Amino acid sequence: MADTKVYRASTTAPVNIAVVKYWGKRDAKLNLPTNSSLSVTLAQSDLRTLTTASCSASYTEGDSLLLNGEPSDVSGARTQACFRELRARRAALEAADPSLPKLSSLPLRIVSENNFPTAAGLASSAAGFAALVRAIANLYELPASPSELSLIARQGSGSACRSLFGGYVAWRMGENPDGSDSIADQVAEASHWPEMRALVLVASAAKKGVSSTSGMQQTVATSGLFAERISRVVPQHMEGMERAIRDRDFAAFAEITMRDSNSFHATCADTYPPIFYMNDVSRAAVRAVEQINAAAGRTVAAYTFDAGPNAVIYYLEQDTELVVGTFYHVLGGEVPGWKQAIISGLKPSL
Ligand code: 2P0
């Protein structure tokens, strides 16, 4: 009789929010970026994906994925790339040790749940692919470092490679054509600057109009500003941001965060036809941050926006009253349109 044993492993992965943005691919097949990026990994208690990976000869339907209770397609090139890379590593272990069960040839079943609405425009693909890759790596008992897993997760979704680390994380663009050096590393532990907080303001639960993948391809192909961003602006921001984090210099951290978000959205507006992710509600958040900083007489808050209208506001714990207090006042009715506010700290390293 065939072995119907089910092998299983679970893990969680957190959301990360970039302060120097990834936008542009130099190789769409390998998911290699046109620039390095840097993010802060948020606490899992607030925003995370929980994923269970299992495999069994009894899974007659082949590989499958259940995402928030809904069957989801696994035939896409990115999911297939992750499965292929992980299976190849498991097969190498099995070849070296014939006593190991042959898990690499069994169908996979992945069950994944977010503790936040997938459609809320938050970076669900980052936590999703990070959790998928680590759950399968755990199932296969791979001796892989977070950096090696980041190389696999990158092929699922670029930003996912940064969710394999806690704290402050850089994704180095690398230069090798095969992508072997396009991996994430930790710039600083969460404990290096544990006062960092993020206020996530959900402006719209609607799915975004232009997906990141197609938006960035259009920007690379048509924006004149983009060349300036990747050759001069981002390298400066990466250097300045690493210094700001090292020195725990919030004013510098905040200025680069806001400038980089502005620069990214400027290249979106410079895409032809233009892409608009921010809306009137987003712009009201920008003005609110400017007012909060002006009233405080120092920089206490920084806004950043991804490929959608939601705002993430970074601030330090000691300025919670000033920053969150003001936004709750705003949320209380002055600016209509905000649906939900989530406050998050940092995810420490494993
Ligand atoms: C980032 N974003 O650095 C930037 C800022 C959106 C704006 O990474 O095509 O979903 O799957 O590699 O990772 C969103 O892009 O794109 C993203 P793919 P991904 O967080």
Image (cartoon, grey):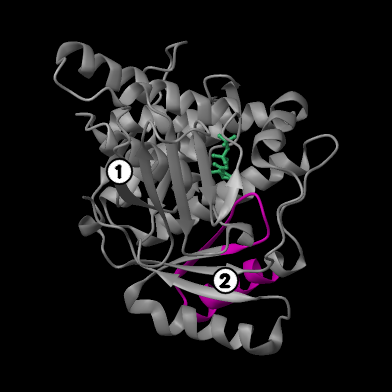
The residue indicated by pointer 2 is: 289
Q: Are marks 1 and 2 in contact (CB under 8 Å)?
A: no
Q: Quadrant of the N terminus?
A: top left
What is the residue that sits farthest to the right in this orientation?
273
Q: Regarding mark 1 in the picture, which secondary structure is present there? A: strand
Image location of residue 327, percent across then percent down: 56, 80
Label 2 within 8 A of ligand 1 by Cβ: no
Q: CA distance from mark 1 to mark 2?
A: 46 Å
- Which residue is located at x 63 percent, y 89 percent? 332
Image location of residue 123, percent across then percent down: 53, 51
Q: Quadrant of ligand 1?
A: top right
Point out the stretch of residues depicted in magenta.
Answer: 284-311
Q: Regarding mark 2 in the picture, which secondary structure is present there? A: helix
Task: Choose top left, top right, bottom left or bottom right for residue 331.
Answer: bottom right
Point out which mark residue 8 bears: 1
- Determine crowd level at label 2: few under 14, some 14-19, many 20+ residues with C-alpha closer than 10 A: many
Residue in front for this viewpoint, 35 or 81: 81
- Which residue is located at x 57 percent, y 70 percent? 201
Residue in front for this viewpoint, 52 or 168: 52
Front label number (1 vs 2): 1
